[in-house]
Image (cartoon, grey):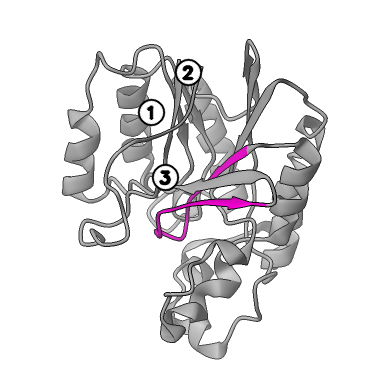
């Protein structure tokens, strides 16, 4: 049994959708896929991904990304209502959005958002970051409030123990996972990359491997005893920063 990582497949793009549908229906039947968010903001594409991947993998585990929670193309009250609809859709298609243990391995999804742990948002960011207009939250919750709401959903699972703990999130848990080669003008996005609250939960959980997405910058890095892996598929033109393939993060 192998555990594969994948995120940010954005199957709104035909090239990405064709890649997904071309995956072997035989090679991964005993394996688990950690799908770390940003499949599509359109529900019918999300369901297509769930159904297609469940035909290929023993288990598919999922955490939503920010794009999955956009509501401007969905008839839904707000992004939190949409989150709950996604949970129902996952359940209907056999996709796991909660923790799962298989023998000595426990796989733990960690929900999150961004709370400006990694920097204060600039005025320029407010004009270019699509979430600010594509998402809507009840009671006009701020991003830090939404972050606290999502990470609180993880609390009940942090006491799980097993020989091998693998966690995964869409959002980045620590800013030093961004490589130093990132151009200064791109660092305007750092405030919306994730939250340090996820890193605290990873440590409490005792993860030895953590998979994340969101940044579209593929990385494999050891930090303080944890292996962090980003295997974002990315947009069709992002060939220099994305592997464009499944990555195995664990084999039993």
Of labels 3 and 1, earlier in sequence is 3
Q: Residues within 10 Å of mark 1 (few under 14, many from 20)?
A: many
Residue 110: percent from the left, percent from the top? 65, 41
> Which contiguous range is marked in magenta?
209-223
The residue that mark 2 highlights is 94
Q: Do the numbered discs 2 and 1 sit on residues whose CB atoms are within 8 Å?
A: yes
Residue 112: percent from the left, percent from the top? 64, 51
The residue that mark 1 highlights is 50
Q: Disc 3 to disc 2, how far (Cα)?
A: 18 Å
- 218 drawn magenta: yes
User: In the rendered image, is residue 48 in sight?
Assistant: yes
Q: Which mark is residue 7?
A: 3
Local secondary structure at mark 2: loop
Local secondary structure at mark 1: helix
Local secondary structure at mark 3: loop
> Is 155 above or below relative to 118?
above
> Is 3 above or below relative to 5?
above
Q: Is residue 25 left or right of residue 109?
A: left
Q: Residue at x 17, y 30 (%)?
A: 22
Discs 3/1, front: 3
User: In the rendered image, is residue 140 in sight?
Assistant: no
Residue 59: percent from the left, percent from the top? 46, 19
Discs 3/2, front: 3
Of labels 3 and 2, earlier in sequence is 3
In the foreground, 192 or 48:
192
Q: Residues within 10 Å of mark 3 (few under 14, many from 20)?
A: many
Q: Residue at x 38, y 40 (%)?
A: 43
């Amino acid at each position: 049994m192998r555990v594969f990582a994948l995120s940010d497949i954005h199957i709104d793009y035909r090239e990405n959708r064709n890649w997904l549908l071309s995956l072997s229906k035989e090679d991964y039947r005993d394996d688990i896929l950690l799908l770390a968010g940003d499949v599509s903001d359109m529900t019918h594409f999300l369901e297509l991904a769930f159904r297609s991947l469940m035909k290929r993998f023993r288990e598919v585990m999922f955490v939503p990304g920010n794009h999955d929670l956009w509501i401007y193309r969905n008839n839904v009250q707000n992004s939190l209502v949409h989150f709950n609809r996604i949970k129902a859709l996952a359940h209907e298609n056999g996709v796991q959005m909660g923790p799962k243990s298989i023998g000595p391995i426990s796989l733990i999804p960690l929900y999150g958002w961004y709370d400006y742990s990694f920097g204060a948002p600039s005025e320029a960011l407010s004009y270019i970051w699509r979430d600010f207009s594509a998402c809507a939250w009840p009671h006009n919750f701020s991003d830090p409030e939404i972050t606290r709401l999502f990470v609180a959903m993880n609390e009940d699972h942090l006491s799980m123990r097993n020989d091998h703990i693998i966690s995964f999130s869409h959002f980045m848990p620590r800013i030093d996972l961004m490589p130093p080669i990132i151009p200064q003008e791109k660092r305007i996005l750092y405030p919306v990359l994730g939250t340090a609250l996820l890193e605290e939960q990873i440590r409490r959980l005792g993860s030895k491997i953590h998979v994340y997405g969101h940044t579209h910058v593929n990385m494999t890095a050891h930090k303080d005893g944890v292996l962090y892996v980003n295997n974002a598929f990315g947009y069709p033109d992002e060939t220099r920063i994305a592997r464009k393939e499944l990555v195995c993060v664990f084999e039993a």
